[in-house]
Amino acid sequence: MTSNDTASSLAINGGRPVRDAILPYGRQSVDESDIQAVLEVLRSDWLTTGPRVEEFEEALRHEVGAAHAVSFSSGTAALHGAVFAAGLGPGDEAITTPMTFCATANCVLYQGAQPVFADVLAGTLNIDPEAVERRLTPRTRALLPVDYTGHPADLDPILEIAARRGLTVIEDACHALGARYRGRRVGSISHLSVFSFHPVKHVTTAEGGAVTTDDPELARKLRLFRNHGIDREFRERQARGTWSYGMVALGYNYRLNDLQCALGTSQLRRLPASVSRRQEIAQRYREGLGGCAALRPLEVRDDVSHAYHLFVIQTEPSRLTVDRDRFFAALRAEGIGANVHYVPVHLHPYYQERVGTGPGLCPVAEAAYERIVSLPMFAAMSDHDVADVLAALSKVVAAFQC
Ligand SMILES: *Cc1c(COP(=O)(O)O)cnc(C)c1O
């Protein structure tokens, strides 16, 4: 085939797509045991904060090796709780990464504090500890690394800075349930670790989140915050036969319910299998992309076990005649539900207009943003699905390589 023939075979040019139905970039796995677990709760006495909540928190804290787990109604609510527990308020700063979902930084704003963006490392796109160092000021109160794609951030140097300056480390581990850093489980490393149970994440409760910590005082504040700032939960009051309670802080209703927690506990049992399937898929992608100079997967450091919430590749501009957006459109047309994670937070209109950030603040992240594409990655993907993604990539690269 000439390269003209290759181009005309592309679905974006009217050719036949690799897949007729779109393969999403992520989706949940719900099995019969999950369904039974939820049905049981519907037939029980408690629908909201009942025994299934404690059971889920116990299973989660056990899974990650932390002393406490406190569930929340979403990952965003959990981040908000962590920022509250860390004591951030007006006048304080928290240093975070731009390569994340906007919720990571929004939560700092919720409490009236200022998010400050430090640039990322070019290999993993995780926050660069040296860039963190450069953003420290006397107002810095917390560090908020994100385990981007499920690859743990370089936590030891971050914890070292925090120890030296008396800061709290809030790790946004929403991508990294089941990951390890230098042999330690994510969720047991930072002062506060935050998880999300949105359907695209490793374990789902439909919507949901949690914070894990070893510090009993932080755990107490988290529980307070998710229940209106009230010092005693309803079930505890009922067990003690008392009506009295005090509202001691301004909290929210951020509770996760028994239906969701029953689903979460059931899902958590399959976490190890889900992570190893994702690692297997990543391995196939790496092998399939091995000889392709136009597409480069992110780096994996040898001191981590990667949980692969996402599999991100970068397009190599010098090897392609099209930019990422055109490459992305061609891939979508082939039936591959690629995505882009993320628009760097400091480039969002709200941040530019109201927080005063803008282009040039984090050049490594901004350059990466022009090149990144997330490939489909979820435990229920079949080997055939993975082969389709690789076939579509090689078809699109063949048409657009220079
Ligand atoms: C999913 C996610 C969140 C927010 O979680 P929700 O449960 O959707 O509120 C926060 N940070 C990161 C990095 C995420 O991926």
Image: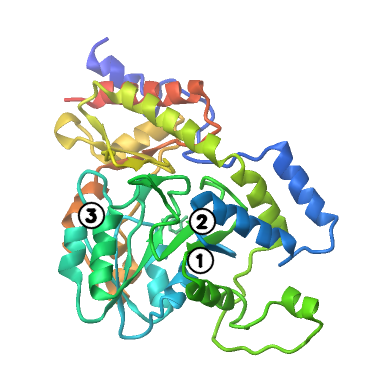
Q: Is the N terminus in the top left, top right, bottom left or bottom right quadrant?
A: top left
Pick whichever of labels 2 and 1 is earlier in the sequence.
1
Residue 102 x, y percent position in the rendering: 39, 62
Note whether 386 is above or below 260 in the view shown.
above
Residue at image mark 2:
196
The answer to whether residue 289 shows anywhere in this view is yes
Pick whichever of labels 3 and 1 is earlier in the sequence.
1
| Other-residue count near label 3 (Cα within 10 Å), few / some / many at <14 / 14–19 / ≥20 | many
Pick whichever of labels 2 and 3 is earlier in the sequence.
3
| Other-residue count near label 2 (Cα within 10 Å), few / some / many at <14 / 14–19 / ≥20 | many
Q: Residue at x 50, y 63 (%)?
A: 211
Q: Residue at x 84, y 63 (%)?
A: 45
Question: In the rendered image, which quarter is residue 139 located in?
Answer: bottom left
Residue type for callout 1: Ala
Badge 3 element: loop
Residue at image mark 1:
78
Residue 341 x, y percent position in the rendering: 36, 49
Note whether 27 is above or below 161 in the view shown.
above
Residue type for callout 3: Val
Q: Is the C terminus in the top left, top right, bottom left or bottom right quadrant?
A: top left
Q: Nearer the viewer, residue 30 or 190?
A: 190
Residue at image mark 3:
120
CB of mark 2 within 8 Å of CB of mark 1? yes
Note whether 77 is above or below 310 in the view shown.
below
- Mark 1 Cβ and ligand 1 under 8 Å apart: yes
C-alpha gap between disc 3 and disc 1? 24 Å
Relative horizontal placement of residue 196, taking residue 86 as reference (left or right)? right
Q: Residue at x 57, y 89 (%)?
A: 248
Question: In the rendered image, which quarter is residue 132 located in?
Answer: bottom left
Residue 258 x, y percent position in the rendering: 72, 60
- Mark 2 Cβ and ligand 1 under 8 Å apart: yes
| Other-residue count near label 1 (Cα within 10 Å), few / some / many at <14 / 14–19 / ≥20 | many
